[in-house]
Image (cartoon, helix red, strand yellow):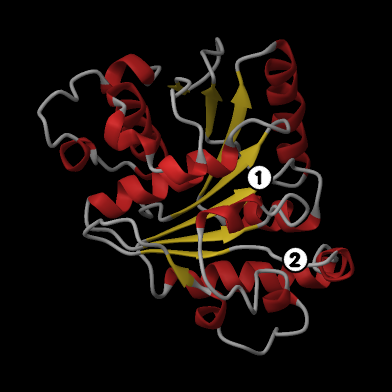
Amino acid sequence: MTVPTTAALVGATGGAGTTRLTFELATALASDGRDVAILDAAFATQGLSDYVAGDLSPDATALLTDAADEPLGSGLVDVDTDTDGRVAACPADAPFERFARAMTTGAAQAFEGRIEDATTEFDHVLVDAPLLASNPTVAAATTCDRVALVAPATDRGADAVGRLTARAADVSADVDAVISTFGALDDADVVVPETESGRVADAPAWRDDTDLAASVAGVASVLFDVDVSDALDSGGVLSSVGEFVRN
């Protein structure tokens, strides 16, 4: 059996908190001594760029277009997370003209190659992806070992899960997990509670939120079959992981 190392976290709706969850998951894995890369496929919203500092050139879109010949490492920015493992992000930070070119079929094929490149250097690769309605997201969904739909616990989120699960099947991709945010959906595999701190500056928030830590550990378990709860549980209070993971 192949051990899963790559995952696409796909937002089922806008505002699902996919980027924040991806960052929380990356830092949780890194706290367990794992090296993690986050690749940005949300070229329109470019939210991942808020979590990094420094030069973002080349960004994720340039690595698929104007800087396609440059190594992936030229676009990776190390994130200071104070963890045993490394977290490096490749955010999108582009004008409309370039991110539009990064949405083409050819660029999506290049994105598949970038995901594969990252696996040679990192223990895990996470792709922060928007709705399953663009070439980059389809590339991520068909290339990564695991695909998770991230949906808010609303009627709109529940409707989107069914619609996007069918859409994934249309492109020969499987949805391996449904992660509900801001509350519980009936068919969610993992429930991520709303955290008191949604500010980027406070991420990762699982360090100060036991329930969030337990749910993020649950996401790591469902997507990668790994147990990071000990690494997140310095105070010995993380005993409720099962509360957030549905059997």
**Residue 133 or 61: which is nearer the viewer?**
61
Q: CA distance from mark 2 to mark 1?
A: 15 Å
Provide the residue designation for mark 1.
Answer: 173
Q: Is residue 198 left or right of residue 226?
A: right
Residue at coordinates 69% horizontally, 54% vertically from top-left?
Answer: 46
SS of the residue under disc 1: loop
Say which quarter of the image contains residue 114. Answer: bottom right
Residue at coordinates 54% horizontally, 24% vertically from top-left?
Answer: 181
SS of the residue under disc 2: helix
Residue at coordinates 54% horizontally, 19% vertically from top-left?
Answer: 182
Q: Earlier in the sequence, mark 2 or mark 1?
A: 2
Residue 86 at x, y percent in the picture:
32, 64
The type of residue carrying mark 1 is Ala
Q: Is residue 222 above or below residue 190?
A: below
**Residue 199 or 105: which is nearer the viewer?**
199
Q: Is residue 37 left or right of residue 103?
A: left
Q: Is residue 141 above or below residue 180?
A: below
Q: Is residue 65 above or below residue 174?
A: below
Question: Can you name the residue that lies furthest to the left here?
Answer: 236
User: Which disc number belongs to residue 108?
Assistant: 2
Say which quarter of the image contains residue 147. Answer: top right
Q: Are marks 2 and 1 in contact (CB under 8 Å)?
A: no
